[in-house]
Amino acid sequence: MDQPIGNIYIVVAPSGAGKTSLVAALLQAEPSVELSISYSTRPARKGEIDGKHYHFVDKATFDAMIDRGDFLEYAEVYGNYYGTSAPWIRSRLEVGQDILLEIDWQGAEQVRKVFPGAIGIFIAPPSIEELERRLRGRDTDTEEVILRRLASARAEIDKIAEYDYIVVNDDFERARLDLISIVRARRLRSEVQCRRLAEMFRHMGTAGAQ
Ligand code: GDP
Ligand code: ADP
Ligand code: 5GP
């Protein structure tokens, strides 16, 4: 794949840290960032809509997609399979679209091998105790699933230094603004601004005085 024009944001967090809530808030504030809808073999939770939260598929369909090379990355997470559609990513990057992947750490490592410029953002909970409270408070998972997710959280936090940005989701509003700031700062980089505003700067510079 050629170097993409659009930015790839990869958001990783231990389950229950607030990734889904924060990403939804970011996309509302920055609608020009588009969310990749993953494929998953996990059963849909109450309120989840096929094609909006995930493309829910059975294991046989998922395996067939692996064989066809349909995934940019895929991983087994907490006993279910999750994967990112390669054709979708390719089509969006080609037109310069910024995209956001909400994926696990294994997927993040795979994507960064293909796209070293992808921007890794880790959302950390303020404490393991608070993480447990949120997982239980969400009331979407069984006890067994909650315990498995908590055990993984510690291992994920051990790899936190691999990310470009770390947002601690203590106060939700502050974390939301932190996440928005990352996206805004990327757009203000000189490389991006010089391309976007080339004409304006040409007029303001010595060329405009002639
Ligand atoms: P899920 O993906 O179906 O688990 O849904 P979310 O976790 O994204 O959101 C569940 C609800 O919690 C939504 O109504 C959010 O607006 C709300 N919510 C998220 N974070 C906070 C917070 O920090 N404080 C409060 N009071 N509500 C929150
Ligand atoms: P994830 O997608 O990382 O599993 P969710 O976005 O589903 O996490 O959040 C887990 C639970 O914690 C949800 O019930 C959400 O409303 C709640 N939550 C998220 N951020 C905060 C916060 N800053 N303070 C308190 N509760 C939060
Ligand atoms: P959940 O079941 O709570 O929605 O997600 C469980 C975990 O799977 C989260 O860590 C989430 O980031 C990850 N995940 C969701 N979609 C993908 C994907 O397409 N690829 C990978 N590798 N992980 C994913």
Image: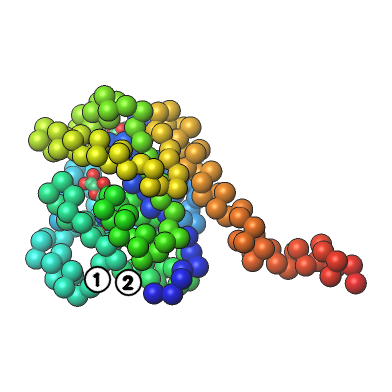
Q: Is residue 164 above or below residue 110?
A: above
Q: Residue at x 31, y 56 (%)?
A: 109
Looking at the rendered structure, the number of numbered marks drawn on it comes to 2
Residue that carries the numbered disc 1 in the rendered image: 70
Does the beta carbon of the residue at mark 1 sit less than 8 Å from ligand 3? no
> Any mark on residue 87, and which?
2
Q: Is residue 152 above or below residue 107?
A: above
Q: Is residue 152 above or below residue 184?
A: above
Q: Distance from label 2 to label 1 (Cα)? A: 7 Å
> Any mark on residue 189, and which?
none
Residue 207 picture location, percent across and down: 84, 70
Look at the image and tell me whether residue 20 can be seen.
no
Q: Amino acid at mark 1?
A: Asp
Q: Amino acid at mark 2?
A: Pro
Rendering quarter of residue 23: top left
Q: Residue furthest right?
A: 210
Taking the image as four quarters, which one is ligand 2 found in?
top left
